[in-house]
Image: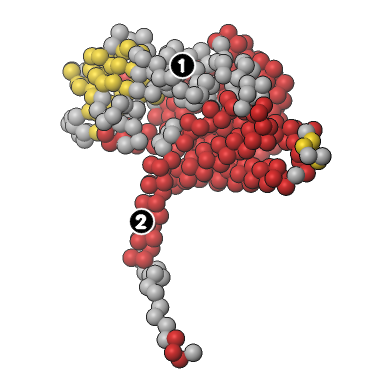
Amino acid sequence: MTAATPEAAHTIETVEELRQRTRDFIRGTVLPAEPAPGERLDDATRDRLQQAAKDAGVFAPHVPVEYGGQGVPIQWWSQIFQEAGYSPIGPSVLNCMAPDEGNMHMLNLVATDEQKRRYLTPLASGQARSCFAMTEPHPGAGSDPDALLTTARQEGDQWVINGHKRFISGARGAGFAIVMARTEATDGTAAGATMFLVDMHHPGIRVGEPIHTIDRAMAGGHPHVYFEDCTVSSEAVLGEMGQGFRYAQVRLGPARLTHCMRWLGLARRSLDIALDRAERRSVFGAELKSLGLAQELIAQCEIDIETSDAIIARTGALLATDPKAGSAMSSIAKVHCSEAIFRVVDRAIQICGGDGVSDGLPLAQYAAEVRGFRIYDGSNETHKWAIARRASSRRRKAVEAGAPYQADAVVRDTESH
């Protein structure tokens, strides 16, 4: 099958047809090829499955058609990404896995034509992987990007980057990095953060110590990366000087949401496993599915899945029409979904008992995969802080604009009653 045309990609019917084909491909081709729980997808299998995805016309659903994708608009990504996420290796096979998916999105919006040719084209085709180098060891940038310590110093028409990054997902084996570095003010440009596109084989880059984490789905791991007098030309600057934090939000708003989409697919898989278990197991003379305690666990899973699905849909629609509002809403979606999805997987483990925590079922691996989401892309506590500040600011401005202040307690004369 061939990729959908841009016009067709904007119809509900075509997106639904692609969702169904993606569902069939994941369940019929990808699931039988999954590595054992706790093991990583090898490159040869990934390449073989990616070619199969291209042949099936389901590869890179989010990528514009001119770069070999399916051209699905962001408000409809969720249906497809959830189907991909039904397998922990599905997003890698369909080339919609982090951090590549977020980098593709930003490159398509910000990069020059030459940068797109050099970096977006091989990334979109699956010929290369990438990483996003922002997080640093304490006291550098982590949840607080203003703490950025990596610097880029201008020397003529070149830039010299120095810094130490950590937890750079996908760095080992990546073809290039998008590097966030602090730059000084120049004529017409204020000091701030600037993004650079740097080939990972550059002699000024050193991929350092691996960070061993509980998740296994991320190709390239989460290692330290060192930039040591890494000299690049002015053509390496991505977008405008000093606008790195603004571009980071362009990237991170949708990237938070696509994490929600992919892992919600894995939550659906977890519940399916638990439902199958409850259907055929009997305890204390009754089918597991008929016991009130099991029904409570199942019902709460359904509630968490459906509320997550709804907030993802709302956020996706906002990102398509009002990116600033959508980025703010993506914080709420990220917090809700990361916690709800983990609860679903955890309940599924409980329903499956001892097998749930063994490698006989994949649920323990799923719990390890989704647990990091409460930390990745900003810890939930950081997002809650930002959400609360926005709520307070919104209400304060409303009252200042004339909305009635409603928190003065009324003193009631009880003796008159």
- Which coloring applies here? secondary structure
Q: Is residue 121 visible?
A: no
Image point 62% across, 38% down: which residue?
A: 347
Going by the image, does 334 lie left or right of 36?
left
Instruction: Pinpoint residue 389: horizontal percent, then vertical percent.
Output: 36, 51
Circle 2: residue type: Ser
Which of the image's four quarters has the N terminus? top right
Vertical relation: 88 (above or below) 346: above
User: What separation in Å lies between label 2 and label 1 (alpha carbons)?
Assistant: 41 Å
Residue 203: image quadrant is top left
At x 46%, y 16%, the residue is 220
Q: Is residue 37 above or below residue 135?
A: above
Front residue of this view, candidates 155 and 403: 403
Which is more foreground, mark 2 or mark 1?
1
Helix, strand or loop status at disc 1? loop
Q: Residue at x 35, y 61 (%)?
A: 396
Tag 1 residue = 220
Out of 244 and 394, give the one closest to the viewer.
394
Q: Observer-nearest residue: 281 or 52?
A: 281
Residue 84 appears at what percent x and percent y? 62, 27
Q: Name the residue that disc number 2 marks.
A: 393
- Which residue is most to the front? 284
Is residue 396 toward the left or the right of residue 185 in the image?
right
Give the image quarter of residue 167.
top left
Mark earlier in primary sequence (2, 1)? 1
Q: Position of residue 308 (x, y in %)?
A: 58, 43
The residue at 67%/32% (across/down) is 353
Q: Which quadrant would residue 70 be assigned to in this image?
A: top right
Q: Is residue 226 above or below residue 84?
A: above
The amino acid type of the residue labelled 1 equals Gly
